[in-house]
Image (cartoon, helix red, strand yellow):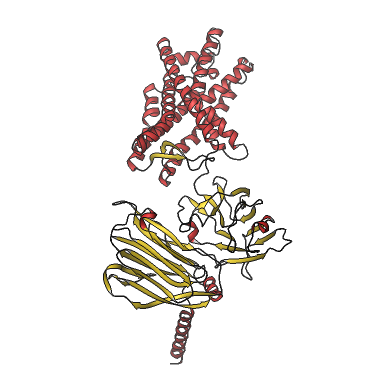
Amino acid sequence: MEPRLTDNLRVLLILIILISTGLGSNDLDWKFCGTWRHGNDSPSLNVSLSTGCRGISISANQSSLSIDGQITAQCRRSEVILLKDLGLYSGEETQFCLYWEPLLDQVKLQVNQTKEKGGKVEAKNLTLCWPASMQGSCCTDLSDGSTAPEATYGIKDAVVKTDPVTDKIRTAYNFKAQSVNCTVLCDQMSQGSTQVNMTDETGDIIQIGLSPEHPCARRSEVEMKDDFRGYSISSPAPKGVSVKTTTTVCLPPALKKAAKKTSKVVCTFFQNNSLFQDGHKHDRVLDDVVEITVENEVIADLSEPIRIDFHHDFIPKMHSRKCVSWDTRKDPLQVNWLVDGCKTKQKGAKHTECLCNHLTYFTVLVQMEPRPVRHLLALTAITSLGCAVSVISCIALIIFLCRKSRRCKEQSIPIHLGLAVSLASLNLLFFLTGVLANVGGESVCVWVGAGLHYTLLSSFIWMGIEIFHTFWLVYMIFIPSPKPYIWNLIGFVLPAVPVIILIAVGGIYGVREVVPSDDVHNPYLMCWMTDTSQAWLAHYFTTLTILAILVSTGIVMLFLVYRKIRTRDEWRQNRVAFLSIWGLSCLFGTTWGLTFLDFGPLSDFILFLSCILNSFQGFLLMLRFFTLDRMRKQADGSSLGSTSTGSTRQHMLQAQEKS
């Protein structure tokens, strides 16, 4: 009996602890969702929020949704907002969610609506109260108050957090609140869960992590005295916590001159606030956000900028970053990060310095996609010129090789023809891709992108065939090479297989935006693979894999050819040696290997060099064949007489090649 009594006492003790813990906890956030049933005549949102801790009321009728309450510590707002002013189609029903975070004094309303009749549902996040620092008391623990009667118009399917209230239509829901010490609430957050459920723009539930080191916004105040010469403020941390990343604000002396009414500056440091991420699908706002304010004053166009140093996690060079600010005067309802008034200085992969000439919210915006292309206009002009010249050159080379095939039966001519045809098609499509993307749109770009991918793979494979054929002629002299139809099957049919599969999968080809670094809002459009994870995977497993194999085998083949012919007399002529290596490099496609070297301090030089060599490849090939043919005629049957492989074929191979 005694062991059983001990077990019962242990269970009772655990229950008492759990109950006391549950009773001692407060609500860290609050959410109310519902569907507002209204008429079609320009419904509006009526907002009336003031300081205090009496509670909040959400009411609705045929024409308006009203949010009235006294729950904030600093925020005061009274405004009427028309749905049509938000670019939303009114319809008959509107889904909404109201979020309240007492520690941040933050109120957000999310409205789910369609932009037009029958259109796609879109979520608008409206910031009714901006984030603020922790105050002395917080208004929390909202509980149900009086219940309104049922009606034809009002709020239905009401839900508080995750608990359904009723599916009936009611005109109002009232909630009472109580005041608690914000420090107690902050300590509770730091000891409890580090995740909060929020809803993204598509309506899906996402979990936002909260750092246990900085569960609440922290503020620092600076009094600018008459002899103010500048001051540095670092983001404070809770006692006993070591902070790996900090934010430092350096206030210039010019701020004292600009502040006319007061001499107190307030810096508020935020971390992991989901509100600041609103509207950014391809960018990520740093966890650290700082607000700098001078009470009751608007400070702008400072003669000396404020310096903000953000120390953050490692950011790779391929992802661009820029200092941004949110001007709450221009965009009071929605977070809108702009680069206006800020300059960015990258001090390293873990340090970004911002120089800004005004006061508001500041952070660093990191582009999650690869960085914008520098010198895009110049590169586009070079590529267009190179492609045009290469198309004409390849056509001339095709005519030259066709005439040559009538005079002699060299095994290499069909291979050279295949490479010339594929390069001509590739350069023609690439030259027209920008025009077709702007004129034809998505439907045309699906097929043009697939064609561009096919011709690129075909060109790579024909370059690989050139490498294999050269190896065959140099090292397998007395074994006849495969028939031309086999090369045609490999060069023209094989690359069509992955392209057809990708077309069947869908969503791989289409319009692709290439963003220039000097004008990120005006991207260049082209027909290629779309910017999706599936398309990137297909690009890596097809294009880049074949290119890596091509470049590596081409370099190896150049080395083998060099070893084979370096002891011959004609190799000692500088002109012959240069033409041999240069010609074979164009033939083998090794210049495409510069694609893998686009990094480091020479990245711009490598990018331009790669652009020039690869876009003019058709012209360089024509130049090679015409030069070798001219040298053959001048030498009258010398060792450079064979145009099939240049200096890789000497007298010992001519008889075999013509057989």
The residue lying furthest to the right in this view is: 227
* Residue shown at the point (58%, 58%) measured from the top left: 298
Residue 648: % across, % down: 54, 20
Specify whether residue 659 is in view: no
- Judge by depth and name the residue closer to the eye, 242 or 279: 279
Rendered view: 297 above or below 191: above
Residue 482: % across, % down: 41, 23
**How many numbered marks are there?**
0
* Residue shown at the point (51%, 39%) measured from the top left: 516
- Judge by depth and name the residue closer to the eye, 199 or 548: 199
The residue lying furthest to the left in this view is: 152
Q: In this view, does 70 lie to the left or right of 608?
A: left
The residue lying furthest to the bottom in this view is: 1
Snapshot quadrant of residue 449:
top left
Rendered view: 63 above or below 655: below
Residue 352: % across, % down: 61, 51
Which quadrant: the C terminus?
top left
Residue 517: % across, % down: 54, 41
Q: In this view, does 23 lie to the left or right of 235?
A: left
* Residue shown at the point (43%, 12%) measured from the top left: 404
